[in-house]
Amino acid sequence: MKFINELKNFLGFKNSKPKEISLKISIPLSDFVNDEVLPGLNFSSNYFWSSFENILDKFSKRNIELLVKREELQGLIDQWHIDTRDSGFKPEEYKEFLTKIGYLVPRSKDFSITTRDVDPEIRKIAGPQLVVPVMNARFALNATNARWGSLYDALYGTDIIDEEGGAQREGGYNPIRGEKVIAFAKDFLDETIPLNNGKYKDVINFEFINSKLSLTLIDKSKTNLKDDNQYIGYMDKGSGAYGLLFKNNNLHFEIQIDSSHPIGQDDPAGIKDILMESAITTIQDCEDSVAAVDAEDKIIVYRNWLGLMKGNLKRSFDKNGKFITRELNPDRKYLLKNGKMILLPGRSLLLVRNVGHLMTNPAIKDKNGDEVPEGIMDAFFTTCISIHDIIGNGLYKNSKTKSIYIVKPKMHGPEEVKFSCDLFEEIEKVFNLPLNTIKIGIMDEERRTTLNLKECIEVAKERVIFINTGFLDRTGDEIHTSMEAGPMVPKADMKNEEWIKAYENWNVDIGLETGFLGNAQIGKGMWPMPDEMLEMYKTKTVHPLAGANCAWVPSPTAATLHAIHYHQIFVKNEQEKLLKREKANLDDLLKIPCIKEDKFPSKEDIQDELENNAQGILGYVVRWVDQGIGCSKVPDINNVGLMEDRATCRISSQHIANWLHHNLCTEKEVINVMKKMAVTVDRQNKHDVDYKNMSPSFDGIAFKAACDLAIKGKYQPSGYTEPILHKMRIRRK
């Protein structure tokens, strides 16, 4: 027996002596861990579960204490606004009060982050970032494979190319539309990899001569690139087809040559497409975009993450009568100019977003019979699964530096960030990982985190790889935190308020001040309209110009189109400029967006606002509760499709709750509006065979959930939607 135990230790088995486990674990979840997660890892089932129980013993109470502190601070802020209502709002007194109660913490001295072993996709490459519900395997695969995307397809299938002059999208291939696509793409080449003379529309041949790319123009003259270093290498695809690899602003793209292709055969140079490096990083989301309320749901979440880490995730489906199997793309191999081979990643670098600190999950209950904190559960499970990538169990590598990237949402201030970092350190010890293997992305989407952002970064300075702004959640918390201050401005006016402008600049300023340039991501929020690509193309340059080296997009197509902006704008240069500007002001951040007396809305304006908010809540909630869909394209009141998740639901429900609390409307009016808009939502979903109408009975669980989110919104912790949604989804299941 001694020999067997020594052999087990030698082979890396952990905790060969079984420990008694008091946890009550869902049998399907236990089977999933034992049969799918642990094989290939050097951890026994008993070690996994006993270690998890130890983690719970160390952190569950602290988790609860942090949630209690949130509510205590909220109560103090509510009372301050009530007590000072008659005397008028005094900014300096307000700031002094927030400091006194510990909502504003002492300011940190200057420092720089020291995070090590970070992949270049995060440190060096500025580009689009996808956020995708990991619970949907097909979406998860599409997003991961969106590292490369067809520019021709992205242009042809969207409104960036107009339909004038017979260039309609419908039907089969339209050569008139195709010509416009090609013209746009060649303009992109002229701008990105310009020639010494001539334009790409006149190129008829590419040659590699004397270590340089030589191009022949239609008049038989020769030219080359203004910057020969932009040409990187070559991919032979057989039968005369090949790809030419270029690099600009640290981003690659490939000009694909194939004269036998239906598109290439009509092109003077045989160009059939331009393949763009697009979604550089992807956040696989376990949080706002998924509806995971029990063991069954969490298994789907973790199983898909496991499939991504091991590289064997596949999905087969019928598309237009054709059976398709989707799997992860391999790396791309090129022959460099010096004759050496290079492999470029075929997949987006994956981060995983865990849930926040608030919710528990019935999949596991502790020794007292209480549901365990879901955030602790996510951290433990997603880390353990990621070890398959770290030790090379997968078909492909995600992190070349052997790091695990966890994005942590909805943290309130430095204490909560410290809690996450301490949790990660303890999990590293459990799995024998080097200190700081687990990196943290800090979602700057709660007011207390924003105001203390530098201090939040400081406690995570050895792990942090990401900060970003999230307008919707941040606005939801702005409204909830200052609920008693007065009625808030309409949602459409919120982006013009001083606090939001300061918030966007403050995030970048603090990130640059603490050494993010060349080391970590500064992100900006989601483009919400997946069908409005022309508008995105026209306006989303604002994000790289604002110093964001990543920005969220709603689809692989959007990632390909947004990548153009990062060829036009070298973010590193913009960040260096921004380091010299006057920094955003804390006083501006503290300006509460209450309606000014001279801009008080009319009864008609109030009705319109209520209808807009109600429609968004209903359109999202009915799918969440009835179908378990955590993120979807929901038509708004004007039938414009918007990407909705819990963040959009949070701001809409808090806005109604705020106006209801300050008597701009009554509960009866809110219910009547909900009924009116439920009819609209039913009509918008009439082609969905799985959809269950809310009208005319209005007695379904989904409709009740939507009403509760608005009417009871003031009383939800931090204004979050999860408690109501989870409760109603469980009832519906």
Image: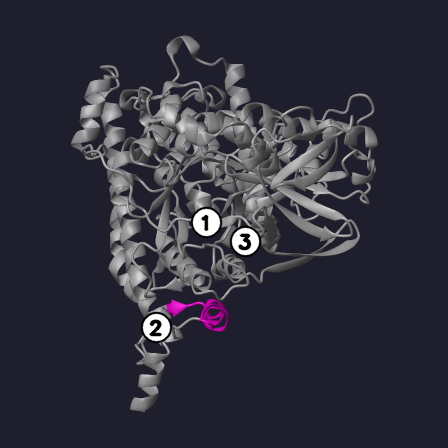
Residue 704 x/y as whole percent: 52, 41
> What residue lies at 34% left-to-right and 73% top-to-bottom?
47
Question: Camera-side residue: 660 or 627?
Answer: 627
Q: Is residue 35 magenta?
A: yes
Q: Which residue is mark 3?
A: 135
Element on which disc 2 rests: helix
Q: Quadrant of residue 454?
A: top left
Q: Height in image: 589 above or below 309? A: above
Is residue 661 something one can see in this rendering? no
Q: Earlier in the sequence, mark 2 or mark 1?
A: 2
Decide: is 71 above or below 398.
above
Q: Are marks 2 and 3 in contact (CB under 8 Å)?
A: no
**Mark 2 to mark 3: distance in Å?**
27 Å
Q: Position of residue 683 (x, y in %)?
A: 69, 35
Range shown magenta: 24-40
Is residue 425 in view from this perspective? yes
- Please state which amino acid type lies under the numbered disc 1: Leu
Looking at numbered disc 3 in the image, what kind of residue is underneath it? Met
Q: Is residue 289 above or below residue 680?
A: below
Task: Look at the numbered disc 3 and give the secondary structure of its residue.
Answer: loop
**Closer to us: mark 1 or mark 3?**
1
Which residue position is annotated with label 2?
47
Q: Confirm whether the magenta stretch covers residue 398.
A: no
Residue 552 placement, left or right of 221: left
x and y percentages locating residue 441 in the rendered image: 38, 44
To which residue does mark 1 refer? 351
Packing grade of label 2 (10 A; few <14, some 14-19, many >=20) is many
Secondary structure mostly seen in magenta is helix
Q: Amino acid at mark 2?
A: Tyr
Marked residue nearer the N-terminal end (2 or 3): 2
Q: Which mark is residue 533?
A: none
Q: Nearer the viewer, residue 60 or 585?
A: 585
